[in-house]
Amino acid sequence: MTPAVWIGVGLWILGLLAYWELWICEGTHLGQRFVVWLYDLAATRYEDIKQFDTLWERRFLAEPVEQVLGRLPDARVLDVGAGTGRLARGLLQLPGVQATVICLEPSARMAALGVGRTPDKLAPWLRAWAVPLPFPDETFDMVSSLEILEFTPRPMKTLAELIRVLRPGGWLMVTNRVGWEAPLILGKTYPRQHFPGILTGLGLVDVEDFRWQMTYDLIWGRKPYPQEAQIL
């Protein structure tokens, strides 16, 4: 082949790689700072891109969380990768909910939008990474992390860190990417049938996997009390 053909083939391959990493993987293999930069760029369009449905968010996020927290007065919730505050908004709009939802988000522009959209004093915001979390062990009654696990450098370490700050008896709510593109996000996603077992292996009990979106499953798991762990 001529040099021009080789150049053309090389550019075509580079284009495919760029499409794979930037569009399908959303830059996750380029590091979390690059991912945050992309989300900063798209922050003002984020909710339009995601097309959040208020009723859907309430039914499948806020109300199940309310049922869990209803047994825990003055509960403390940590939302890791809070985005623009979807969980805090949905939860704190429900009557009678008195939980404090700490919204942790590394993107400055996403967090700024979130602060403006969740003015409630029960939803403080903090800019920080998922690993390490800036909290002591067993701090929260519930920890959520929606649609961010595959964007962290080491998803297994992220899961362990989420569980670390969870109190015994508290619940973890996390998503697992399962869309057609998930296997292409190399080293960052887990097969649907294996993910509940991963959480069980990290010490959680009562693990349940729900079909939530076309691209994500929603998984719940509870951190056992010490006496339960001894029995298990």
Image (cartoon, rainbow, N blue to C red):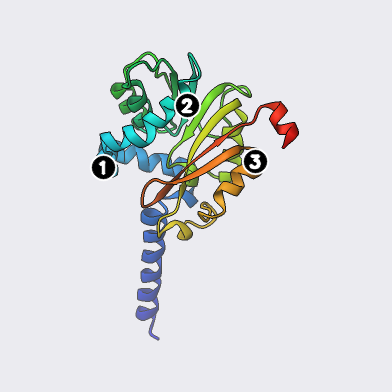
- Image x and y of residue 55, in percent: 27, 35
Q: Along the polypeptide, which appears first: circle 3 or circle 2?
A: 2
- Numbered mark located on residue 68 in the image: 2
Q: Which residue is mark 3?
A: 202
Q: Nearer the viewer, residue 87 or 170?
A: 170
> For mark 2, does the 10 Å Cα neighbourhood hold few (<14), some (14 to 19), or many (20 or more) residues?
some
Q: Which residue is mark 1?
A: 51
- Numbered mark located on residue 90 in the image: none
Q: Nearer the viewer, residue 187 or 98?
A: 98
> For mark 3, does the 10 Å Cα neighbourhood hold few (<14), some (14 to 19), or many (20 or more) residues?
some
Spatial CA distance of label 3 from label 2 is 21 Å
| Quadrant of the drawing holding the C terminus | top right
- Image x and y of residue 142, in percent: 51, 27
- Camera-near label (3 vs 1) is 3
> For mark 1, does the 10 Å Cα neighbourhood hold few (<14), some (14 to 19), or many (20 or more) residues?
few
Q: Residue at x 45, y 56 (%)?
A: 182
Question: In the rendered structure, which amino acid carries the disc numbered 2?
Answer: Val
Spatial CA distance of label 3 from label 1 is 33 Å
Q: Quadrant of residue 103?
A: top left
Is residue 118 among the parts visible in the rendering?
A: yes
- Image x and y of residue 120, in percent: 34, 16
| Quadrant of the drawing holding the N terminus | bottom left
- Camera-near label (3 vs 2) is 2
Question: In the rendered view, would you say 108 is above or below 195?
Answer: above
> Residue placed farthest to the bottom in the image?
1
Horizontal placement of 120 versus 232: left or right? left
- Camera-near label (1 vs 2) is 2
Spatial CA distance of label 1 from label 2 is 26 Å
Question: In the rendered structure, which amino acid carries the disc numbered 1?
Answer: Gln
